[in-house]
Amino acid sequence: MPTLKIQETSGELVSRLREANQSLVIASVRAQDLQDQAEAAIERQKEFLAMLAHELRNPLAPIAMAVGLLQKITPAHPQLPYIQQVIGRQVTHITRLLEDLLDASRVTSGKINLRKSLLLLSDVIHSAVEISQPSFDKKRQLLTVDLPGTPVVIDGDAVRMAQVFSNLLINASKYSSHHQSITLSARLADNATLAVCVKDQGVGIDPELQPYVFDLFTQAPRTLDRSEGGLGIGLSMVRSLVELHGGTVSVHSEGLGHGSEFTVLLPVTGVDLVPEAAPVAAAQAVRPCRILLIEDNVDANETLSFCLTAEGHTVASAFDGASGLAMAKDGAYDIVVSDIGLPGMDGYEVLRRLRLLALSPQPACIAMTGYDRKPLSDVGGPPGFDHYLVKPVSIAVLQAIISTITRPATLA
């Protein structure tokens, strides 16, 4: 009998082990399924952000160019300058929100590339203050900047580092009342570390929220009017960019109503080194060019054509790829400016067929795109465009590119 009981007990144990193993297998399959679903959701989110940015850039492009035109027009009405300033401020605001969305997409997909060089801390802070100054002016706030008396050099991306500190300053302004003071101070630690602090007297942060303030799309409670706007992306970008520079960022607040202090720690390259000044490019007179503009958005086409014509260029417009290619065949153009997302024949196909024509001289080709990077279809393919511009296209940037393009042919 004892032997039989042992056998029965062993059989039950084996049966239970099999059931447990089956449960583990089922749980593992479910976990993998959930992981696959989460990864698919993240990928859909990235695709959505990229497409949203593309769709927003298309209407934003002609608005931005129209603002540039208004600046050149002699005021026919006393209110015209004010109207132009209103439009300009709002376009700048929309563009900033759009870039925040794109930066969030770049961070989640690991596609932010830094262009590092030796930077003076004072130059970085000056750029950040310049970017954020309108926020302080709007609320009549006082910004105090306290930097070390000795030059401090950091190794970083000038644009991204200015973005870090301007985001912190704008955030401090956003959550502070009118006429309050905000301080940006920097000090050197003993371990070759730079500490930059942005301190405000604003609404403060609830202790329960502080561990999450750098998470994407996290925001403190806001009033219903949301007068300060924002997407909950700025502080997440600060953390990501600081970490890419080998640093850390933290926040401290005594709680609601007691203000906040954000501290960025960065490695220091040296205090007695001065980075070489970037060479100043000699101003070049932009000679008139013959330009073929291929853009299917009528407003964007006409507005950009007006802007280029106002700069002294002769512009011919096409509204689809096939028409643009037909116009380009006679070789009468110094420059071809083409949208990528054209109906029927896209910009890359226009370029490919244009290169096959073997025109002499070959026109310089400039791409305009609503996407924030070159499409994968262009990687490893035939020779691409000479320049890529992301919408909304800056007329100043386009003019700078045109100034570098020399063609033996001149305007008749």
Image (tube, rainbow, N blue to C red):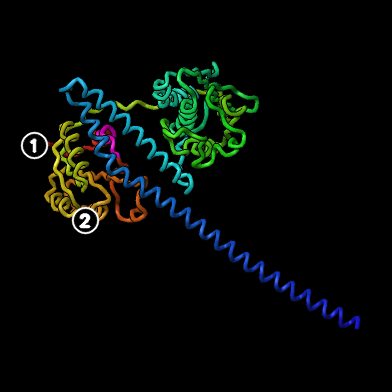
Q: Which numbered marker is on residue 403?
A: none
Q: Which residue lies furthest to the front in this view?
A: 224
Residue at 64%, 68% (x, y): give it: 25
Above or below, 202 relative to 18: above
Amino acid at circle 2: Arg
Q: Residue furthest top?
A: 149
Corner quadrant of residue 76: top left
Instruction: Decide whether the magenta segment is chiefly helix, strand or loop.
Output: helix
The quadrant of the rendering that contains the C terminus is top left
**Residue highlighted by disc 2:** 353
Left or right: 98, with 193 as reference point? left
| Mark-to-mark CA distance, 2 and 1 | 27 Å
Image location (x, y in percent) of residue 231: 44, 39
Q: Which of 317 and 142 is in front in this view?
A: 142
**Tag 1, which secondary structure?**
loop
Image location (x, y in percent) of residue 106: 44, 45
Highlighted range, magenta: 392-399
Res. 27 visible in picture: yes
Above or below, 28 relative to 323: below
Residue at 66%, 68% (x, y): give it: 23
Q: Which of 340 and 210 is in front in this view?
A: 210
Amino acid at circle 1: Ala
Above or below, 305 relative to 131: below
